[in-house]
Amino acid sequence: MSDEIFNEVNEDLRNERMRKLWRQFGPWVIGAAVVIVLVVAGNEAWRWWQTSQQNNSAEQFVAALDLVEEGNYEEGIAALNEVEASGAGNYPALASFREAAALAQQGKIDEAVAAYDGIANTQGDQRLRELAALFAAYLLVDGGDPLAVTQRVGDLQVDGHPLRNAAREAIGLTYYQAGEFEQARTQFDAVANDPAAPRNLAQRIGLYIAQLESQGITGTDAAGASE
């Protein structure tokens, strides 16, 4: 009987100590739990918001593309500008590229080049900057100004760069337009001798070289100049 009472007293004491501890630390524990719940809920809400924003940006981007494809360039470019200004995820960058392309489609080459140059000078992603510079270079080919093209993509010609052969093509075509056939052949030979050149590009380069050979440009002098 005494053992039973002793056990009950001990149980009451343990319960009382627990109640005191809870009164002392309970608010902090509850507060910490609430913070954790709020943080988790906040993260989930942030993910949802980001997804929602990106979905909205995707819808805006597609709608802008539809306008451009329908020939409504003014409205389409205005819609693309809106995506650039307030879009989420990668859509602002995509919109800036598509806007430059839309300007080129309208024959506004100077404006399109300026748009691509703007991307190349401000975009945070290096590969996107280089891609914009390459697109600007291709638009400048018909102008026959090798310096303008080389200034944009000359640095991309280094071995191992994924855009090296596209850069060589743009520079080579510009030299050809300028009537500097030897230099053009040098650029085309560099692509032809690169085993990593994409097949469709290699086929185009083959046609360029055949055209130059029909003009008597054999590549001998160009090969010697590159040594």
Image (tube, grey):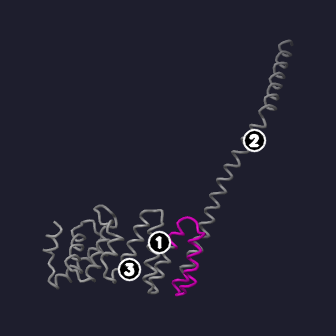
Would you say 156 lies left or right of 78 here?
A: left
- Callout 3: helix, strand or loop? helix
Q: Are marks 2 and 1 in contact (CB under 8 Å)?
A: no
Q: Which residue is mark 1?
A: 118
Q: Amino acid at mark 3?
A: Leu
Q: Nearer the viewer, mark 3 or mark 2?
A: 3
Q: Which residues are magenta?
A: 66-95
Q: Nearer the viewer, residue 5 or 84?
A: 84
Residue at image point 41% right, 64% down: 127
Q: Residues within 10 Å of mark 1 (few under 14, many from 20)?
A: some
Q: Which residue is mark 3?
A: 139
- Looking at the image, tell me whether mark 1 or mark 3 is earlier in sequence order: 1
Q: Nearer the viewer, residue 137 or 91?
A: 137
- State the quadrant of the C terminus: bottom left
- Looking at the image, tell me whether mark 3 or mark 2 is earlier in sequence order: 2
Decide whether the magenta segment is chiefly helix, strand or loop: helix
Q: Residues within 10 Å of mark 2 (few under 14, many from 20)?
A: few
Measure how far apart labels 2 and 1 are at the Cα level: 50 Å
Residue 99 at x, y percent in the picture: 50, 78
Residue at image point 47% right, 82% down: 103
Would you say 136 lies left or right of 169 here?
A: right
Q: Which mark is residue 181?
A: none
- Callout 2: helix, strand or loop? helix
Q: Nearer the viewer, mark 1 or mark 3?
A: 1
